[in-house]
Amino acid sequence: LHLGNDTMVRLKSVVGIFDMDTTTISKHSRDFLAKAEKGGRVYNVSYELPKSYVVCIDDANRETVYISQISSATLKKRAVLYTSLV
Protein backbone atom coordinates (compact mmCIF):
# COMPACT_ATOMS: atom_id res chain seq x y z
CA LEU A 1 0.00 0.00 0.00
CA HIS A 2 1.55 3.28 -1.11
CA LEU A 3 1.31 5.85 1.72
CA GLY A 4 3.02 8.73 -0.10
CA ASN A 5 6.57 10.00 -0.67
CA ASP A 6 8.07 6.64 -1.64
CA THR A 7 6.73 4.90 1.48
CA MET A 8 5.01 1.56 1.02
CA VAL A 9 3.83 -1.05 3.50
CA ARG A 10 2.68 -4.60 3.00
CA LEU A 11 -1.08 -4.73 2.88
CA LYS A 12 -1.15 -7.83 5.08
CA SER A 13 0.55 -5.86 7.88
CA VAL A 14 -2.09 -3.10 7.90
CA VAL A 15 -4.31 -3.26 10.98
CA GLY A 16 -6.26 -0.09 10.24
CA ILE A 17 -6.47 3.10 8.23
CA PHE A 18 -7.78 6.07 10.21
CA ASP A 19 -8.90 9.61 9.40
CA MET A 20 -6.83 12.07 11.40
CA ASP A 21 -9.64 14.60 11.92
CA THR A 22 -12.37 12.26 13.10
CA THR A 23 -10.37 9.81 15.20
CA THR A 24 -8.21 12.26 17.12
CA ILE A 25 -11.33 13.68 18.76
CA SER A 26 -11.28 10.61 21.01
CA LYS A 27 -9.03 10.71 24.06
CA HIS A 28 -8.17 7.03 23.49
CA SER A 29 -6.90 7.75 19.97
CA ARG A 30 -4.86 10.73 21.15
CA ASP A 31 -3.37 8.63 23.97
CA PHE A 32 -2.58 5.82 21.53
CA LEU A 33 -0.78 8.18 19.14
CA ALA A 34 1.09 9.91 21.98
CA LYS A 35 2.26 6.57 23.39
CA ALA A 36 3.35 5.36 19.94
CA GLU A 37 5.26 8.60 19.34
CA LYS A 38 6.94 8.37 22.74
CA GLY A 39 7.98 4.82 21.88
CA GLY A 40 9.53 5.94 18.58
CA ARG A 41 7.02 3.99 16.52
CA VAL A 42 5.55 6.90 14.54
CA TYR A 43 6.84 7.78 11.09
CA ASN A 44 5.64 10.87 9.28
CA VAL A 45 5.85 10.13 5.56
CA SER A 46 5.23 13.75 4.61
CA TYR A 47 5.66 17.16 6.11
CA GLU A 48 2.39 18.32 4.59
CA LEU A 49 -0.85 18.54 6.55
CA PRO A 50 -1.56 15.04 7.92
CA LYS A 51 -4.87 13.57 6.81
CA SER A 52 -4.63 9.97 7.99
CA TYR A 53 -2.62 7.45 9.91
CA VAL A 54 -2.06 3.78 9.22
CA VAL A 55 -1.37 1.24 11.95
CA CYS A 56 0.73 -1.76 10.95
CA ILE A 57 2.04 -4.82 12.79
CA ASP A 58 5.17 -6.55 11.52
CA ASP A 59 6.09 -10.25 11.74
CA ALA A 60 7.61 -9.71 15.21
CA ASN A 61 4.31 -8.19 16.47
CA ARG A 62 5.77 -4.67 16.63
CA GLU A 63 3.31 -1.89 16.02
CA THR A 64 4.19 1.01 13.71
CA VAL A 65 2.13 4.10 12.93
CA TYR A 66 2.55 5.95 9.64
CA ILE A 67 1.24 9.50 9.33
CA SER A 68 0.22 10.31 5.74
CA GLN A 69 -0.92 13.34 3.79
CA ILE A 70 -3.19 11.07 1.74
CA SER A 71 -6.80 10.82 2.90
CA SER A 72 -8.01 7.65 4.60
CA ALA A 73 -10.67 7.25 1.88
CA THR A 74 -8.01 7.23 -0.86
CA LEU A 75 -5.82 4.78 1.05
CA LYS A 76 -8.80 2.46 1.59
CA LYS A 77 -9.64 2.62 -2.14
CA ARG A 78 -6.04 1.71 -2.98
CA ALA A 79 -6.18 -1.25 -0.60
CA VAL A 80 -9.48 -2.50 -2.03
CA LEU A 81 -8.25 -2.03 -5.60
CA TYR A 82 -5.09 -3.99 -4.89
CA THR A 83 -6.94 -6.87 -3.21
CA SER A 84 -9.38 -7.09 -6.11
CA LEU A 85 -6.48 -7.37 -8.58
CA VAL A 86 -4.76 -10.19 -6.72
Image (tube, rainbow, N blue to C red):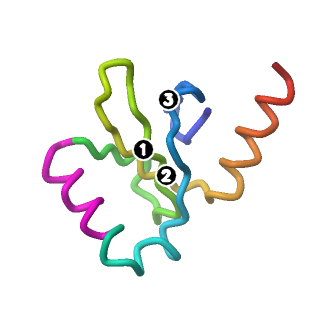
Of the image marks 2 and 3, the number of the one nearer the N terminus = 3
**Closest to the observer: 46 or 76?**
76
Instruction: Look at mark 3 in the image and give the residue it sits on.
Output: 13
Q: Secondary structure at mark 3?
A: helix
Q: Is residue 22 left or right of residue 37?
A: right
Disc number placed over residue 45 in the picture, else none: 1
Q: From mark 1 to mark 2, how far is it between C-alphas?
A: 6 Å
**Closest to the observer: 44 or 21?**
21
Label 2 neighbour load within 10 Å: few <14, some 14-19, many 20+: many
Say above or below: 51 vs 17: below
Quarter of the N terminus within the rendering: top right
Q: Residue at x 70, y 58 (%)?
A: 73
Is 37 a magenta residue? yes
On the image, the x and y values in percent for residue 22 come to 52, 76
On the image, the x and y values in percent for residue 46 come to 43, 49
Disc number placed over residue 68 in the picture, else none: 2
